[in-house]
Image (cartoon, grey):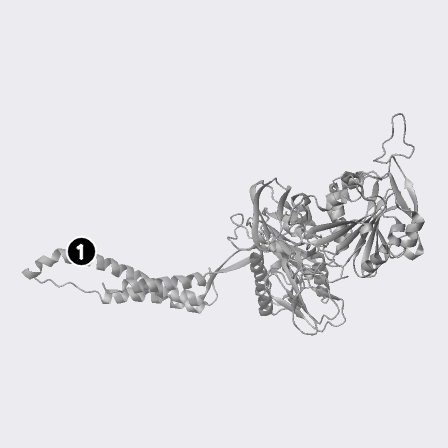
Amino acid sequence: MQLLSPAYAAFLFLGILPVLIHLHGRRRAQVRKLPTLLLLRASNRRVAQRTRLRHVLLLLLRILLLLTIPLVLARPFVETDSDLPVQVSQTQRAVLIFDDSLSMMYQPGSELTLGKATLFERGRKLASRIIDALPQGAEAALILGSRGGEAPVGELTSDRTRLYSAISALRPTHRVSDLPSAFKRATQILSTQRDGLRRIYVIGDTSAHALDGSLHPPPETEVSLVDVREGKMLPNCAVVDLRAEPASSMGPRAVRVMAELHNFGDEPVKELQVTLLVDGQAVAKGLVDLQPRGQAMKRFIHILPQAQSQPQTPGSGEAQVTQGAGLHHLAVKLATDALEADNARHLRVDVQAVLRVLLLDGDPRNLRRDDEAYYLEMALRPSERDDSQLQLVTRSLDEGLGSLSEFDAVVLLNAKAQDLSRRGIERGLIEYVKGGGGLLIGLGDNVEVDAYNRVLAELLPQPLAVIKTAGALPNHPTGEGESSTQGPGEHIGQLDRHHPLLQPFVTGRSSESLLSASFARYLLLQPTPRSQGETTAILSFESGAPALIERVVGRGRVLLYTSTLDRDWNDLPIQPAFLPLVQQIVRHLSRAPLQKAETETLIGQTRDIKLQPGDTRVEVTLPSGKTRLFERLQGRKLLSFGETREPGFYRVATAGETGVLRPRPTEHFVVNIDPIESDLQLAPASRLAALQRPLITQENGPAGKNPRRRVELWHALGWALLVILLGEALLLRQK
C-alpha cells in the first residue's frame, strides 16, 4: 500500500489516546457494607457486565475513529495489473475512437462482470482509465465511431479536464458503426504530428460487422482494440424486417403484416413473445421459436379501422381523406431482452377512402358470365360486404356517361369506337382525364385499330398497330381432330417492380400466377417519337410488347391493357393474381393511398418532405415528442430532413400564408434502425490480431507486461468513518 499524502500518517499515534483516557477515567469500586444494598447486588452484577461490554466497544470504535481520520487524509492506494493495453503507459500521441453505435446499448446480465450496466457505460469507464494511465506530456483526442458521428475533441490536447468532460458527456445513439471513416479522421488528426509514437485506441464491442474487411490499420500507427465485453458472447433477438400487404380475402381493409425475426445467438429461443401494435395499441400477440443463428417469419392479419372521406372536388381525381383517418402506425415488438432498441420495427400504412368506380360495358351480354364486366366486378367486389371501400356502377354505352365527377376511376371495356364517337363519350372521357381522373382501357373483338386511333388519339398511350394471335383462344377450344397453328400462347415476361401499382408482386412467389397466365391474343402498339418520355410500360410480354402501359394526360392518367379483361383472349381472370392486380389498378388510377410500400428510412438517412405551393413553414414531430420547425420555405419543392436520430413514427405539419400549422398525413413517415447492429457476433481472433498487431517497436517496458493501475482506498475509508461515528452515537445513547 502507498500513500498520496504521507505526512498525515504521523497522526496515527493518536490511536493510543482513547486507551489512556479510558484508563484514567476508570472508576474504582468502593466497598460499602450497607445491609440495605444487599437486595440490589445481584442486579448490579448484570448491569455491570453490559456496561463493561459497551465500554469495550466504545473504546474500539474511538481507536478506529482516530486511526481512520489520518488514513483518509493520507489517501492510501494500491497498484494492481490493469486490463488496459500494454501501450497505454508509454509516451505517445493517441486518438480514442469511441463506438457509440446502437450495439453499445446492450445491457448484459450475469454473463459479464458488469451488473446491469450497458456496454456503453463500461466503455466510458475504460476511456477515462486510458486517459488516467497516459503519462505526463501525452496528448490525446476523442472521436466517435458511428456513422455521422462528431469529434468531441477533434485535435490533440494534453488538457485532461477537457477530455474527462467530453467522455462524461458521451451518450449512446441508434446509428450504425462506421469505423473506416473514424480511422480516416484519426489518421488526419495524428498526421499533424510527425515525431513520437502514434496510436489509435478503439473502444467498442469488437463485433464482426464493425471490424469487417474494409477496415485497415493506418500506416505507421499502432491500433489497440479495447473490448468492452471481455470477449464474451452476447445473445440477441431482433425484428429485422417488417412488411404489410393487402389481405383481400378478409375484406378491403384487411392487411397481412409480416415480421422477419432473427436469433443472433448460439442458443435456441423458445416461445419468444411477438406483439403487433396498431397506433400504439397492442392488437395481437403470438409466440415464435427460433433456432440458433436462425430466422422465422411471424404473420398477423388485422382489419384496420375504416377511413372517413369527405365529398370529392369535381375533377380532382383524388379521394379527399379526413386528416389522419386512413393513416396508421404499425409496429411489431418482441419481449424485453438485453438490447431493447432493436426489439421493435415500425411501418406506415395508409387505408384508402371509399372509392366509386364506373364500368363502361362496351359489349353487354344476357348471360352474366359472358358479360364483359363479370370478371372485373368479381375482382373488385370479391364479397358483398356492406363496408366495402369500392363502390361499382356498371353502365352500357347506350346509357351514356352522366356526371363523371362523382367517380374516382372509369374502366372502358371493349367498346366500339363508332359508339363512343356517336354518343360523344370520348369527349367526356378526355375532359375527365385532363381534369385529374383515371381511365383504364380494355380491348377486345370490338376494337377497330384505325377507328380507335382516330377517336381516342388524345387518350391512348400509343397508337394501336395490329392484333397478334399467339395461341388458341380460351373460350374457343380446338375441335376434335383439329390442331392449333397459332402456338402455345404468350406470357408476361417483364414487370416494372418499382412501379407502385405492382407492390403486391414485389416478392418472388407473389408474381408466379401473374407470370403463368397465358395470352392467346393481344394488340401490338406503334412506337412513335411523340410517346417517348410520356408513357411507362408496367407489364410487358416475353416478346417485349407492352401488356399494360401508362400515360399521363393533363392532371390524370390513362392505363391501356392490350388484351381483354375477360377470358376471351387470355386466362388471366382465373389466375390468383387477377384480383390484387385489378384492385391495384383502380386504386392507382384513383390516386387513393393503399397499403403502399415506400423506401425505408433508416437512422441517420435524409428524408425528403414534399412541399406544396404556398407552404412557408414545416414542423416535424419526432417520436419522442420533440419538434423541429423550418421556416422561410417559399418557392421550395422539397425539404431535406436529416434529424432522423430516433426510431419510430414522425409527423409532419405545414403552414401557408395564414401561418396555421395543419397536419399533412401524406408526408408522415417512419424511421427504423439498421438491422446490421443487432448482430453482436464476436469478430474472429485472426481479424482482431490483424488489426492490432504491433506496427512499431515499443519504447520501454517488457513486451507483454500489462500496465499498472491504481486503486484508491480512501473512498472506502470515508464510508467506514461514517459507520464508526454512527456506531459511537448509538452506544452513547442514554438507556
**Amino acid type, callout 1:** Arg
| Nearer to the camera, 539 or 33 | 539
Q: Quadrant of residue 166?
A: bottom right
Q: Is residue 113 above or below residue 665?
A: above
Q: Nearer the viewer, residue 16 or 501?
A: 501
Quadrant assignment for the C terminus: bottom left
At horizontal 56% and vertical 51% (from top left) the residue drawn is 282
Any part of residue 460 in sight: no
Total marks placed: 1
| Residue sticking out furthest to the top | 481
Residue closer to the observer: 350 or 235: 350
User: Dot 1 corresponds to which residue?
Assistant: 46
507, above or below 613, in the image: above
Outermost residue toward the left? Answer: 35
Image check: 655 left or right of 578? left
Expressed as whole percent of the image width and height from the top left, the position of residue 12 reads: 37, 65
Residue 202, position in %: x, y?
65, 57
Residue at figure coordinates x 56%, y 59% from the top left:
125
Query: Is 363 on the left-hand or right-hand side of 690?
Result: right
- On the question of residue 610 being in view, the answer is yes
Q: Badge 1: few (under 14), some or many (20 or more) residues near its Cα, within 10 Å?
A: few
Viewer-proximal residue among 423 and 467: 423
Residue 77: x and y in percent read 48, 61
Tell me the SS state at disc 1: helix
| Residue 609 vertical placement versus 542 (above, below) | below
Q: Position of residue 322 (x, y in %)?
A: 65, 61
